[in-house]
């Protein structure tokens, strides 16, 4: 076997011929310093509609990104044709660092984690007070996902003309979550949409809720004509009619600065991906009490230090009860 010394000539080195005749692979990636910055508005069958300098541009993910996927809300860098004209296609070459993520799994036994939305500031959990009946366990799961992903929660209670919100609000009072209560008439003719809009101004808000709670009706009232304009662009690209809430869609908030991200209606909200130790971070008044907890404490055990911490008057007992209820959601199904 021949060994090469320190000073080899080029003639001494043999290279394997490239049978395909194309360029050899390299780990050196182009920097794309001239790439334009954009935001992903929606994703449909591998095509991403992005907002670039006020234009909607259709793009695909560059091969060099590998399996890294872009989702609605991602800040991306693009190259190629960014005119936004029909039959043009740009390439996404970079995905920016995410400040927050809304994630879910199909159920609690599913290890496959799906990122639904990136870089949202707020998660609006839309729940009807009747028709259909409220599902507190579903609300709890959405709250856990929000706290885990770095989003601030907002409760939007609809159909108050059919039932009172008092009982449901009492259940979440200790969490100090902002809320808005609306009726069907207020959304169409009153100030219901305006009161919700006040909570969204200057922020990027993802909306989540199961079918029938009035989420899409509310989103339509908040974004107005923008839904039809952006959706029309997306449908023209795919050539197929598609319901707007079969995939997440980011739309500018009408009448104020901000973004609304409408997500598909969910039947379940799995929390397999959530580390229970992160949920406590949403309760800063309880965090100091965990210093004396045993290692890997689940905060719902006989020797949990939070019981003594609350008994000594350092925090409201209702806050500890709320924490443990949220932690328990990962062990239960929404319908339980």
Image (cartoon, grey):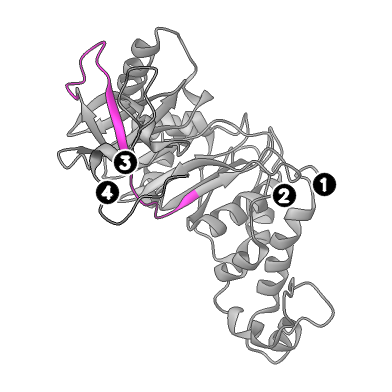
Q: Which residue is mark 4?
A: 8
**Label 2 SS:** helix
Camera-nearest label, 1 or 4: 4
Q: Which residue is mark 1?
A: 336
Tell whether position 225 is magenta: no
* Label whose residue precedes the other's in the sequence (2 or 3): 3
The picture places residue 264, in percent across and down from the top left corner, at 55, 30
The picture places residue 241, in percent across and down from the top left corner, at 45, 9
Q: Dots 1 and 2: beta carbons under 8 Å?
A: yes
| Left/right of residue 186 with respect to residue 203 in the rendered view | right
Q: Nearer the viewer, residue 192 or 276?
A: 276
- Alpha-carbon distance for marks 4 and 3? 39 Å
Q: Nearer the viewer, residue 334 or 182?
A: 334
Camera-nearest label, 4 or 2: 4
Q: Which residue is mark 3?
A: 94
Could you tell me which residue is drawn at 42 percent across and 37 percent down? 261
* Label whose residue precedes the other's in the sequence (1 or 4): 4
* Label whose residue precedes the other's in the sequence (3 or 1): 3
Q: 10 Å neighbourhood of mark 3: few (<14), some, or many (≥20)? A: many
The picture places residue 196, in percent across and down from the top left corner, at 42, 45
Q: Nearer the viewer, residue 320 or 220?
A: 320
Task: Name, please, the residue furthest toward the front.
Answer: 1
Segment colored magenta: 82-101
Q: Which mark is residue 137?
A: 2
* Label whose residue precedes the other's in the sequence (1 or 2): 2
């Amino acid at each position: 076997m021949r060994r090469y010394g320190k000073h080899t000539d080029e003639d001494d080195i043999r290279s394997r011929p490239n049978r395909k005749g194309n360029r050899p692979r390299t780990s050196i990636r182009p920097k794309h310093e001239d790439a334009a910055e954009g935001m992903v508005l929606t994703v449909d069958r591998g095509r991403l509609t992005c907002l670039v300098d006020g234009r909607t541009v259709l793009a695909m993910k560059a091969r060099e990104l590998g399996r890294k996927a872009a989702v609605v809300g991602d800040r991306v860098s693009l190259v190629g044709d960014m005119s936004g004209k029909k039959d043009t296609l740009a390439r996404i070459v970079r995905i920016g660092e995410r400040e927050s993520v809304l994630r879910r799994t199909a159920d609690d036994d599913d290890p496959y984690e799906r990122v639904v939305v990136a870089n949202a500031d707020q998660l609006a959990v839309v729940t009807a007070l009747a028709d259909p009946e409220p599902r507190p366990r579903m609300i709890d799961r959405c709250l856990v996902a929000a706290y885990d992903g770095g989003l601030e929660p907002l409760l939007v209670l609809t159909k108050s003309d059919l039932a009172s919100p008092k009982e449901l609000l009492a259940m979440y009072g200790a969490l100090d979550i902002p809320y808005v209560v609306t009726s069907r008439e207020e959304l169409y003719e009153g100030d219901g949409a305006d009161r919700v809009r006040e909570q969204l101004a200057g922020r990027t808000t993802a909306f989540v809720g199961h079918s029938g709670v009035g989420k899409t009706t509310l989103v339509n009232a908040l974004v107005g004509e923008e839904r039809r304009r952006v959706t029309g662009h997306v449908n023209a690209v795919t050539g197929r009619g598609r319901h707007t809430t079969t995939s997440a869609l980011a739309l500018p908030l009408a009448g104020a600065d901000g973004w609304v991200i409408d997500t598909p209606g969910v039947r379940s909200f799995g929390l397999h991906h959530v580390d229970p130790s992160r949920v406590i971070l949403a309760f800063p008044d309880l965090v100091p009490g965990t210093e004396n907890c045993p290692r890997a404490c689940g905060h719902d055990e006989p020797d949990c230090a939070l019981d003594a911490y609350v008994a000594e008057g350092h925090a409201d007992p209702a806050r500890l009860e709320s924490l443990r209820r949220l932690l328990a959601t990962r062990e239960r199904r929404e319908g339980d």
